[in-house]
Structure formats: structure tokens, C-alpha cells
Amino acid sequence: MDLPSSPPVSRRELNKAATRQAIVRSVFEQLQSVGYEGLTAESVADAAGVSRRTFFNYFPSIEAALNEPTKLLLENAVAVLDEVDPGIDLLSAAVTTVESLVDPALLEPIANLYLLASEHPQMARMQLEAWNDCAEALTEIITARAPNGTELAARVFAQCIIGAGKAAFGQWSRQLTEARDPADPRRTQMLRATLAEAIAQLRDGFPSLQQRAQHTRKA
């Protein structure tokens, strides 16, 4: 029996999606050119070819527009995670999900925002809120995949994933600084690989930390 096909996307919905993408693209272009302090709804709207009113119809604030790539990346990750074989353990499924994040169009603006957040406390707070929202979404996913688990276990698990993600971003940022080439075209691939490695550390029980240091007994 044939499954019912998805309804076609209307031209109106396509236009709305295009407008939303134009606003997000403009806010990041403006961020690069004028910096965070120079961002205004008017300048972003003008660059996107829309009115100030249209901007606020799509986003309640500049910060919300900046957070859009993170939201899309999370939604993409959720979709991938839902497709992973339920028989695979959660951490292995998380590694598979991260390794699937191959779209630089989503990862690049998030990477840029992370690098700039260290210079702007307000952006850093906004990024922290994004991580917290991600933890809540992950808790829901984990609960759905492991319905017999406790709420506390799901929340601890989600925070472990988020902690691994933060550590990966930090390590990636230091690598770029040490290499003195933050514009390295391979940086999104480096970030994705570092994220996957960080979660794999959780999955594998931190194998490098299991090696005991050699202690010499004092005479």
C-alpha cells in the first residue's frame, strides 16, 4: 500500500522561508562588518530588503535572529537522531548524529558566533541560553528513546552531552588560536570532528584517562 505523500509546500510558505533566510544571512553579514554593537533591526532589515516591521514579524530581537542557525542545527540533529536505530545506545546514536552534521551553512554561523562571544558578554549570555535550551530539548529526546529511565537520569545525560559540546567548542577555538588561522576553510570540518570526538569520549568511558600514572615508591 502506498503511503500518503506530504502536502506540497505553498508558494507563500516558500516565500516566508526565503525571507527568514535573508534576514538571518543579513544579520551575520552585519555582525562581521559592523560588530555586535552596530547591529540594529533597521540595518539588518535594509540589508535583507525588508521593512523593520517585517523583521519583527519573523524575530522578536536581533538575538533571536542570531540564534536561528543554532535552532536549525538542533532541529536537524533531532531529525537525524529520530532516524537512528532505536537499538543503538544513546551515546553511539549521539556520535552518529554529530557526524552527520555536514552542512557548513548551518555550522559556520554558529562557529562564528562562538568565536565572537568571547569578546561580548551579552553574546556569551545569549549563547548560554542557547545551550540551556538545547539541554531541555535533549532531555525530551532522551526520555522518548529511553522511557523506562528516570527524569533525573535523562537530565544528567543531557547535561553530559551539552558539557561535551562546550568542551569541544572550547578546544576547537584554542586550536584555531594556536594555529593563528581562524579563517581556515577547514574549520567547520575540524569543529564537527572535535564534537564527535568529545561525545565519543563519553561513550567510550574516557579511555585515555584510564591509564594509571606510574608512581615510584620512595625508599
Image (tube, rainbow, N blue to C red):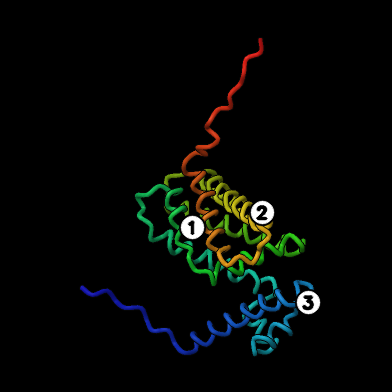
Helix, strand or loop at disc 3?
helix
- Picture residue at 52% right of the left edge, 39% below the top: 206
Is 150 or 209 nearer to us in this picture?
A: 209
Query: Does 203 appear above or below 68?
Result: above
Residue wearing tag 3: 38
Q: Amino acid at mark 1?
A: Val
Is 80 or 26 nearer to us in this picture?
A: 26
- Picture residue at 66% right of the left edge, 75% below the top: 28
**What distance separates the C-alpha of mark 2 from that of mark 1?**
20 Å
Q: Residue furthest left?
A: 1
The location of residue 215, given as percent across then percent down, is 61, 21
The location of residue 10, given as percent across then percent down, is 44, 87
Which of disc 1 and disc 2 is earlier in sequence?
1
Residue wearing tag 2: 174
Q: Residue furthest top?
A: 219
Which of disc 2 and disc 3 is earlier in sequence?
3
- Picture residue at 46% right of the left edge, 53% below the top: 95
Q: Dot 1: few (<14), some (14–19), or many (≥20) neighbours within 10 Å?
A: many
Which of disc 1 and disc 3 is earlier in sequence?
3
Q: Amino acid at mark 3?
A: Gly
Q: Quadrant of the C terminus?
A: top right
Residue wearing tag 1: 98
The location of residue 67, given as percent across then percent down, is 63, 69
Query: Does 38 appear above or below 84?
Result: below
In the image, taking residue 97 as reference, residue 132 lies left or right, namely right
Q: Quadrant of the N terminus?
A: bottom left
In the image, taking residue 41 as reference, residue 199 lies left or right, namely left
Helix, strand or loop at disc 2?
helix
